[in-house]
Image (spheres, coloured by chain):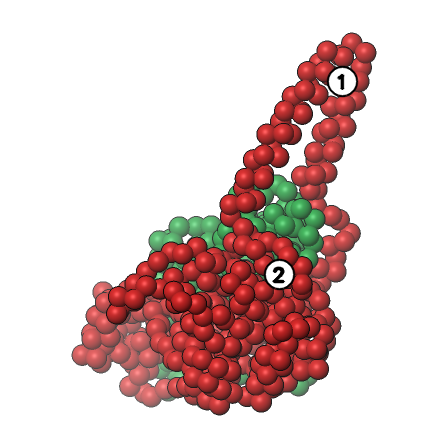
């Protein structure tokens, strides 16, 4: 820090102090950001004030975070909690229903209450019939039919699909697109072929309604294109991948340093980063990959580069298994580390931005 | 994780699918931990509190009325447990700065580039620890997790305008009389 910078504390324009702090916290609208930036370009004292505050807060953040990271490991919490849970099961609605029914039965079984008992039985039967009909209707309306590990089933939009098997799972989507999810992956199908039609810039019709939300883990996806150019997108915490007909791999991690990797075997994928007031995208071609990282509060999208060997190998193996869909045969390309964490060799390390 | 997905997940847990609780824990573990850390000022204790929060939440999950508000409910439990822990021990929160680097093996401490920066950092850390709790908790949350104002508002259940004004005031307190420190470190 130079002597000149040390002299400046609040900046010459007290009325700008609040705006500059909001600018530093990324809490201003884009037009206000530009206004503050223009002011700092003209006003040297405010620019110095911004630099000093930013540096001091970086020092403070670094010290606090370092102390916290050295003392505890919050990533262990999930394992510790899940291992403690069997000690007490939550009271489910079924258990409550059984309890209430038992109490009601005991009450009504009294000799003096036989009439009530008969009336209550009739009411319960009627209610049961109506409830079954209602549940049947609901189940038919808002579900997405999938084939999971060879078994036909259905999920609701937004319902979690948690892959807990050691070898991962093959999941066939309603339009015969195929997903292979590695162990420990969890994701949701937000919508699928609801035929919500929009038009692109050339006036062609595009359906945007094949949308997965990947929370954590890795997916290999074989997307079936169709005549009406239905869009297919995968959303992660810090990136969106949009495709039309291709085979690709996507992996995301949770936690503060989020990392999303996208690799393409065939076709094209547009990868868009997602962050506060931050836009940017890249288009990946055949055998290319990119990484989106969160670093220092900013989201960085790396330039496309050649597909890494281990991801390439995984995608090739995935392609070979598209007919048989044997998850066990995917095992040789997965390197299992720890109990339930699957990492594909050294490719999923948080990367420093090259931009 | 969108809100209706969270509600679905809570429903799945309540219907007996225990494994569906893990995604919820993994999503919120860092936020809950940092909130506890900001409130009690001790990382090891915060980890225990975060773990206890998830266990208490699981035990009382059937009491959650609006399942889409699982996060807010969880933060409420964290705040209550943190206040309870502070009251129970009747001690002041231990400053985060009290941990010595020499006590931790194989650690290369992040230090400012020069001694001037060290003076400034020491002053800032001291000021942070002695300022009123309502400012200190907000500033710690901001610095530890780079939370947005909206996230802080959700975690502490206070209006976003209050977050904005308290952060502003807190930062002013943090830097009061810093000019003399800077002059000294020249």
How far from the left and from the top, in percent, is residue B5?
53, 54
User: Could you say which is closer to the camera, residue A63 or residue A152?
Assistant: A152
Badge 1: few (under 14), some or many (20 or more) residues near its Cα, within 10 Å? some
Q: Nearer the viewer, mark 2 or mark 1?
A: 2
Q: In terms of image quadrants, where is residue A135?
A: top right
User: Could you say which is closer to the camera, residue A194 or residue A310?
Assistant: A194
How far from the left and from the top, in percent, is residue B115?
46, 87
Q: Which chain wears green?
A: B
Residue beneath label 2, please? A147
Q: Which chain wears red?
A: A
Q: In terms of image quadrants, where is residue A296?
A: bottom left
How far from the left and from the top, in percent, is residue A127?
62, 27
Chain letter belonging to callout 1? A
The residue lying furthest to the left in this view is A42
User: Residue at left 40%, top 56%?
Assistant: A195
User: Residue at left 63%, top 50%?
Assistant: B12
């Amino acid at each position: 820090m130079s002597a000149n910078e040390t002299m400046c504390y609040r900046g010459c324009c007290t009325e700008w102090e609040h705006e500059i702090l909001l600018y530093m916290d990324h809490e201003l609208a884009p037009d206000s950001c530009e206004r503050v930036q223009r002011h700092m370009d003209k006003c040297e004292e405010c620019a110095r004030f911004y630099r000093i505050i930013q540096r001091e807060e970086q020092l403070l953040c670094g010290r606090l975070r370092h102390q916290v990271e050295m003392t505890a490991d919050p990533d262990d919490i999930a394992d510790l909690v899940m291992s403690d849970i069997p000690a007490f099961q939550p009271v489910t609605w079924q258990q409550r229903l059984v309890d209430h029914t038992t109490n009601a039965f005991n009450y009504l079984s009294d000799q003096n209450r036989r009439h009530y008992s008969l009336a209550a039985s009739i009411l319960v039967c009627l209610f049961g019939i109506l409830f079954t009909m209602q549940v049947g209707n609901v189940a038919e309306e808002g579900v997405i039919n999938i084939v999971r590990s060879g078994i036909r089933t259905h999920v609701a939009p937004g319902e979690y699909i948690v892959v807990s098997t050691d070898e991962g799972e093959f999941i066939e989507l309603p339009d015969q697109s195929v997903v292979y999810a590695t162990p420990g992956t969890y994701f949701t199908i937000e919508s699928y072929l609801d035929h919500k039609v929009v038009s692109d810039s050339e006036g062609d019709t595009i359906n945007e309604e094949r949308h997965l939300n990947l929370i954590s883990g890795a997916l290999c996806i074989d997307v079936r294109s169709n005549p009406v150019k239905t869009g297919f997108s995968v959303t992660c915490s810090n990136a969106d991948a949009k495709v039309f007909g291709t085979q690709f791999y996507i992996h995301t991690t949770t936690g503060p340093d989020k990392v999303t990797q996208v690799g393409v075997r065939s076709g094209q994928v547009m990868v868009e980063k997602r962050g506060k007031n931050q836009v940017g995208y890249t288009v990946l071609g055949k055998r290319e990959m990119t990484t989106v990282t969160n670093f220092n509060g900013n989201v960085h999208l790396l330039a496309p580069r050649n597909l890494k060997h281990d991801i390439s190998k995984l995608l090739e193996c995935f392609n070979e298994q598209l007919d048989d869909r044997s998850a066990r045969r995917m095992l040789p390309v997965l390197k299992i580390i720890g109990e339930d964490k699957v990492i594909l060799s050294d490719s999923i390390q948080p990367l420093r931005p090259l931009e | 994780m969108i809100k209706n997905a969270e509600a679905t997940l809570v429903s799945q847990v309540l219907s007996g699918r225990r494994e569906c609780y893990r995604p919820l824990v993994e999503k919120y573990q860092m936020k809950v931990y940092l909130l506890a850390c900001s409130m009690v000022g001790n990382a090891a204790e915060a980890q225990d509190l975060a773990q206890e929060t998830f266990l208490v939440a699981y035990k009382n999950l059937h009491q959650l009325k609006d399942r889409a508000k699982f996060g807010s409910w969880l933060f409420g439990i964290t705040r209550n447990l943190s206040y309870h822990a502070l009251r129970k021990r009747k001690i002041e929160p231990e400053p985060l700065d009290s941990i010595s680097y020499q006590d931790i093996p194989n650690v290369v401490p992040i230090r400012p580039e020069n001694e001037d920066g060290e003076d400034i950092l020491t002053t800032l850390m001291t000021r942070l620890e002695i300022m009123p709790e309502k400012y200190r908790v907000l500033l710690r949350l901001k610095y530890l997790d780079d939370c947005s104002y909206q996230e802080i508002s959700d975690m502490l259940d206070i209006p976003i305008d209050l977050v904005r004004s308290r952060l502003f005031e807190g930062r002013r307190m943090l830097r009061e009389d810093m000019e003399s420190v800077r002059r000294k470190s020249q």
